[in-house]
Image (spheres, coloured by chain):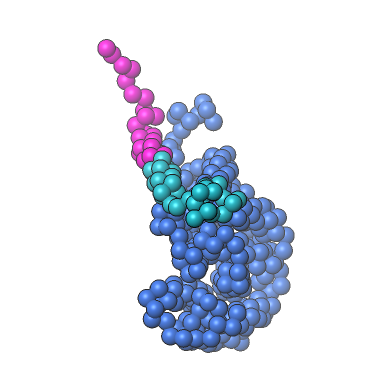
Amino acid sequence: MSFHPQHDLHKRRKGRNMAVGLLLGAFVVIVFAVSIVKLSQPQNIDRNAPNYRATVADQ
Amino acid sequence: MAETSWDKAYETQFGDYVELLKPRVMRLVIFTAAVGMFVAPIAVHPVIAFASILCIAVGAGASGALNMWWDRDIDAIMKRTAGRPIPSGRVEPGEALAIGVTLSVMSVVMLGLFANIAAAALLGFTIFFYAVVYSMWLKRATPHNIVIGGAAGAFPPMLGWVVATGGIGIEPVLMFALILIWTPPHFWALALWRNDDYKAAKIPMLPVTHGTKTTRNNILGYSVLLIPISLALAFTQIGGLVYFSVAVVLNILFLLGAIRVFWRSDADNLADNFRAEKQLFAFSILYLFLHFVLLLAEAALRGLDLAPTFLVLL
């Protein structure tokens, strides 16, 4: 198998591409972390809250 | 752009894009938003706090990118701003606009999901206010531009508070007012010795339109107005004896600096190259920074049950 030689653009943009990749990775980690925190918090007793649960509110 | 981008002389680096977000302003936004969040009476989970402050910082950065896109013509004229990414040719104007719009939308949506809708709405309004009302509309139209720009910079502590509580109270309003009223004397002190720059760029800064005497009067006026706002915070739930004692000293020093600038003439400025103005500008930064450090200290003392009893009147 032979590939085309890398265009100069690939080299010039390497640092920038790596940084964008890391940034996207960090974004995924943050969304994941917030999701875990939000899901593990107690269910809300506020009837208008998105995580409202009647059974919790009754207690 | 598509055909030239393969072989252009300069390849835009990641750092150039970061510079579009005004990292130095961002640092201040992060600090004041964090204080606004931590002094609020409702505790925020550290992960939510981190994610929310990130959204506020990115939103502020996005409005900075929009500001640089819109102001690229005058930025190229002024010495202070000629090295910014667009006037120096490192970033295409279209790219800055795209980054500004994308990050604005992303930060608002993510803050809505991470924190609450009220905080997201306020962040959206802040970006709109800075990018459209200030940059596009009033900056080049009125010598009061700095007062309006100050309002945009005053939102972060309020944003932090809204993230924590979902609402507004007297405390975030006073923190907002503190930065709002602090900005004009802070910036006009700078404008006095950067007058020629603003003249060249045809920005209607107060010293350009109404002369240096009016500017000195206004610096003193706003500095006096700042005192009751700064001290009123001491008598709210987030203030206290420690805040009050240090704030009194800071206000006396700031007022003395403003009075010194008030009595000076243009001849004095030429003689010592704006020494008093530069000192007032430098001290104003310390003044605001210490106010927020003090609020943070009061919150820490309350957390440890060490805060001395003090009047809560507001």
**Which sits in the foreground, B133 or B192?**
B133
The majority secondary structure of the magenta stretch comes to helix
**Which sits in the foreground, B26 or A40?**
A40
Q: Is residue A38 visible?
A: yes
Q: Is residue B93 visible?
A: no
User: Which colour denotes chain A?
Assistant: cyan
Q: Position of residue B87 (x, y in %)?
A: 54, 48
Instruction: Look at 46% across and 66% down and name the residue there.
Output: B38
From the viewer's perspective, is residue B165 above or below residue A7? below
Extreme residue toward the front, this view: A59
Magenta residues, start to end: A1-26
Q: Position of residue B56 (x, y in %)?
A: 51, 55
Instruction: Look at 60% across and 69% down and name the residue there.
Output: B169
Extreme residue toward the left, this view: A1
Residue B59 part of the magenta-drawn span: no
**Could you tell me how many numbered marks the image carries?**
0
Determine which quarter of the picture holds residue B213.
Answer: bottom right
Residue A24 part of the magenta-drawn span: yes
Instruction: Look at 51% across and 49% down and name the residue there.
Output: A55
Q: Position of residue A3 (x, y in %)?
A: 31, 16
Extreme residue toward the top, this view: A1
From the viewer's perspective, is residue B163 above or below residue A1? below
User: Which colour denotes chain B?
Assistant: blue
